[in-house]
């Protein structure tokens, strides 16, 4: 699904998604991604929500996000709370949702000028 055209003023936005891919500013990626408005998308080394670890969540804090969105794939899945403790302990806003919803939410937060980090598994 195409979301909308990239807006360079807003930096890096999610412009599409579908089975097995995400698109950032019109460029298609076929692996899990970390997306922020002010940095090029980076591969996320976590292969699936089932292999998410507290260490992987802790590494997201290096980017000093205000809000972290975790897109869990086609369906919304909740990891065990102990895996999220680094984000919870740092008092970072955290939302867990399916990847399509996370894409839309990310774009709204970017448009608002929020410092958001999206850690996205493929839908």
Image (cartoon, helix red, strand yellow):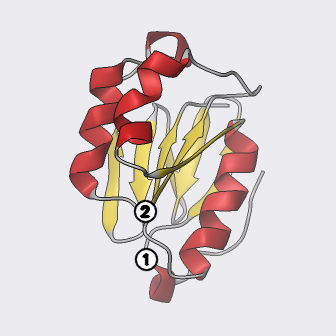
Please give left or right for residue 3 compared with residue 13 in the image: right
Q: Quadrant of residue 6?
A: bottom right
Q: Alpha-carbon neighbours of circle 2 within 10 Å: few (<14), some, or many (≥20)?
A: some
Q: Position of residue 120 (x, y in %)?
A: 53, 38
Q: Tell me the residue at 66%/48% (across/down).
A: 102
Q: Tell me the residue at 37%/59% (across/down).
A: 65
Q: Quadrant of residue 123?
A: top right
Q: Earlier in the sequence, mark 1 or mark 2?
A: 1
Q: Tell me the residue at 47%/89% (across/down).
A: 9
Q: Position of residue 2 (x, y in %)?
A: 74, 58
Task: Residue 45: tell me if it is visible.
Answer: no
Q: Position of residue 13 (x, y in %)?
A: 54, 66
Toward the viewer: 98 or 115?
115
Please give left or right for residue 53 compared with residue 112 in the image: left
Please give left or right for residue 26 compared with residue 39 in the image: right
Residue annotated with mark 1: 11
Element under disc 1: loop
Task: Residue 49: tell me if it is visible.
Answer: yes
Toward the viewer: 9 or 80?
80
Q: Is 77 situated above or below 90?
A: above
Q: Tell me the residue at 37%/39% (across/down).
A: 89
Q: Is 79 situated above or below 4?
A: above
């Amino acid at each position: 699904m195409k979301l909308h055209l990239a807006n360079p003023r807003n930096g890096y936005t999610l412009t599409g998604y579908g089975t097995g891919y995400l698109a950032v500013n019109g460029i298609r990626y076929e692996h899990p991604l970390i997306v922020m408005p002010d940095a090029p998308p980076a591969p996320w080394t976590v292969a699936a929500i089932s292999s998410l670890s507290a260490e992987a969540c802790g590494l997201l804090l290096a980017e000093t996000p205000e809000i972290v969105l975790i897109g869990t794939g086609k369906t919304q899945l909740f990891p065990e709370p102990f895996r999220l403790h680094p984000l919870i302990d740092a008092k970072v806003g955290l939302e867990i949702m399916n990847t399509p919803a996370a894409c839309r939410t990310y774009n709204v937060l970017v448009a608002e000028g929020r410092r958001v980090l999206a850690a996205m598994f493929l839908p």
